[in-house]
Amino acid sequence: MSDAANRNEAGKLVRARLIITGRVQGVYFRANTVDVATAHNVGGWVKNRPDGAVEAVVEGRWEAVSKVIEWCRVGPPKARVDDVELIWEVYADEFDSFTALTRHNEY
């Protein structure tokens, strides 16, 4: 993407759903995602899925959401990220903060 395109995207409000697979449960992935997302001032949630993956919905400015996505591709030190499925969704402005969900069926 060109520098001009990056400047145009930076202020755009976006929403992304991520399905992160690998060794991503039991390694503080959710807690660290909350810290990273909060530091980038985005809203949404992260949760463990019954299939062993971690799922997250991230909303905010394009540049901030992109930083969270980049971090999720690596994860915390004890994680091993094999894949991040990225699904762009319509921005809904439904979150005031970013939280870790504790039950699989939330959201």
Image (cartoon, rainbow, N blue to C red):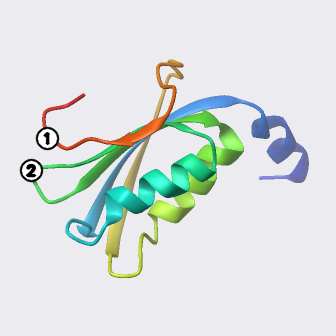
Q: Nearer the viewer, residue 86 or 105?
A: 105
Task: Pick out the residue farthest to the right.
Answer: 4
Residue 47 against residue 88 in the figure, above or below: below
Q: Quadrant of residue 106?
A: top left
Identify residue type, mark 2.
Pro
Q: Which residue is mark 1?
A: 104
Task: Pick out the residue farthest to the bottom.
Answer: 78
Provide the secondary structure element on which disc 1 rests.
loop
Residue 77, x across and y down, in percent: 41, 81
Residue 10, x across and y down, in percent: 77, 40
Residue 45 against residue 12 in the figure, above or below: below
Report, in whole angstroms, how far the alpha carbon at label 1 lies from the one at label 2.
Answer: 7 Å
Identify residue type, mark 1.
His
Quarter of the rendering occupied by the C terminus:
top left
Q: Which residue is mark 2?
A: 50
Q: Quadrant of residue 25?
A: bottom left
Q: Quadrant of residue 75?
A: bottom left
Residue 84, x across and y down, in percent: 38, 58
Q: Nearer the viewer, residue 55 or 3?
A: 55
- The answer to whether the residue labelled 1 contacts the one labelled 2, judged by CB atoms less than 8 Å apart, is yes
The mark nearer the N terminus, 1 or 2, is 2
